[in-house]
Image: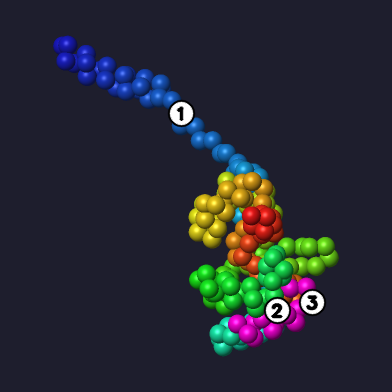
Amino acid sequence: MRALALLLLLPLLAACGAEDASPTVRLQVEAAPAITRPVDVEDDGPADLSEGVEAKIASIREILDRNSLTRLSRLADSEPAFVSNFAGESNRVHWDLLRRTGFDPLAQLGLLLDGPYGVREVGDETWYIWPDLAALQPEDLVPERLSFADRARLLDLVGEEGIERIRGGQGYPGVRTAIAEDGRWLYFIHESEDMATTEGQD
């Protein structure tokens, strides 16, 4: 009798359970607005080299291929305002002295031109500068403002001493060169003017 009662109650319990089941609710959520999505910023890099700059680089590379410091000095001497040092020495004398210390101007210049360059607006002129880090303003050259890769590259280029000078507010203290948009070779130097002044006072 008890078993029969249970059998009669089962359909009723099942029906009640079906009625108490929570209905399935589906919500439609609009897509997030575009402003919250990452913005892809394309880095086009520095401006392309001007024809004047490309022509000057071709002239320099021809001299480098000949490994001729004499020809490099003649090219530098022909530039109206070229700077190789802040001690007032002629380009040839200065580079000869550097060679005696183990610094090969020809090899160093070749390495610079093989690497990345930056662009800086100076007055109404555009200057192309090697390496690219040398084109940065001193406040932008502080290691903490650089990417990890550029920070490591800066340390490799100028060393700890150079990093300290940058932290002191100086510009890029390493080997660098620049060519104006019209093809004038502006400088190829390995020191800063304040450093040369200090050395001259010793």
Instruction: Quickly name the residue at label 2.
Output: 76
Specify the quadrant that holds the C terminus.
Answer: bottom right
Q: Secondary structure at mark 1?
A: loop
Is residue 25 found inside the magenta-colored segment of the image? no
Instruction: Quickly name the residue at label 3.
Output: 80
Other-residue count near label 2 (Cα within 10 Å), few / some / many at <14 / 14–19 / ≥20: many
Specify the quadrant that holds the N terminus.
Answer: top left
What residue is shown at x 16% (from left), y 15% (from top)? 3
Q: What segment carries the magenta color? A: 69-82
Instruction: Quickly name the residue at label 1.
Output: 23
What residue is shown at x 43% (from left), y 25% (from top)? 22
Q: Nearer the viewer, mark 1 or mark 3?
A: 3
Q: Which percent across, then down, holds residue 200? A: 67, 58
**CA separation, marks 1 and 2?**
86 Å
Callout 1 amino acid: Pro
Callout 3 amino acid: Pro
Q: Secondary structure at mark 2?
A: helix
Res. 51 mark = none
Q: Are marks 1 and 2 in contact (CB under 8 Å)?
A: no
Asked whether residue 7 appears in the rendered view, the answer is: yes
**CA separation, marks 2 and 3?**
9 Å
What residue is shown at x 79% (from left), y 77% (from top)? 80
Q: Nearer the viewer, residue 176 or 43?
A: 176
What residue is shown at x 40% (from left), y 24% (from top)? 21
Q: Nearer the viewer, residue 178 or 90?
A: 90
